[in-house]
Image: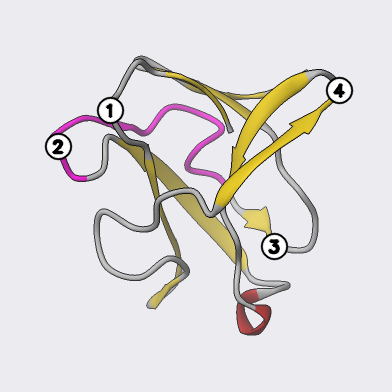
Amino acid sequence: VEDKTGWEAIAAYSWSGDTKIFGDWPGAQPAGTETVGGKEYKYFEVAFEHLGLKANIIFNNNGGGTQIEGKPAQVDLVLDQDYFYVVTADDAVFAE
């Protein structure tokens, strides 16, 4: 994610049916950062056993009471590729 939220911390909660991709709420914090196309992204790592699942995702301020549920955050993402989001305090959209 390109984190433009201004939050102290960002977390991602993701699920596929009863499977919690990043564990219980509020989910996982980023595993690190990487620069792609001149932009810095925070990234979340998905365990191998979750690859290929169709999952939904909610970004939140690490359990502090704010979450982003806007499209395309809650859509079936097939966990088989990298997804790039721009996340603000109001929205989460695919990066261009």
Q: Earlier in the sequence, mark 3 or mark 4?
A: 4
Q: Which residue is mark 3?
A: 79
Q: Which residue is mark 4?
A: 37
**Residue at image location 62% in from the left, 30% down from the top:** 85
Q: Earlier in the sequence, mark 1 or mark 4?
A: 1
Q: Which residue is mark 1?
A: 8
Q: Secondary structure at mark 2?
A: loop
Front in this rendered view, residue 44 or 83: 44
Indicate whether residue 96 is drawn in magenta. Answer: no
**Residue at image location 50% in from the left, 53% down from the top:** 56
For disc 2, the neighbor class at 10 Å (few under 14, some 14 to 19, many from 20) is few
**Residue at image location 18% in from the left, 45% down from the top:** 63
Quadrant position of the C terminus in the picture: top right
Quadrant position of the N terminus in the picture: top right
Front in this rendered view, residue 91 or 5: 5
Above or below residue 66? Residue 57 is below
User: How far apart are the two marked residues, 1 and 2, measured between alpha carbons?
Assistant: 10 Å
User: How far apart are the two marked residues, 2 and 4, measured between alpha carbons?
Assistant: 31 Å
The colour scheme used here is: secondary structure
Tell whether label 4 touches label 3 (CB within 8 Å): no
Q: Which residues are magenta?
A: 63-75
Indicate whether residue 64 is drawn in magenta. Answer: yes
Give the foreground label among 1 and 2.
1
Q: Amino acid at mark 1?
A: Glu
Q: Earlier in the sequence, mark 2 or mark 4?
A: 4
Above or below residue 8? Residue 96 is above
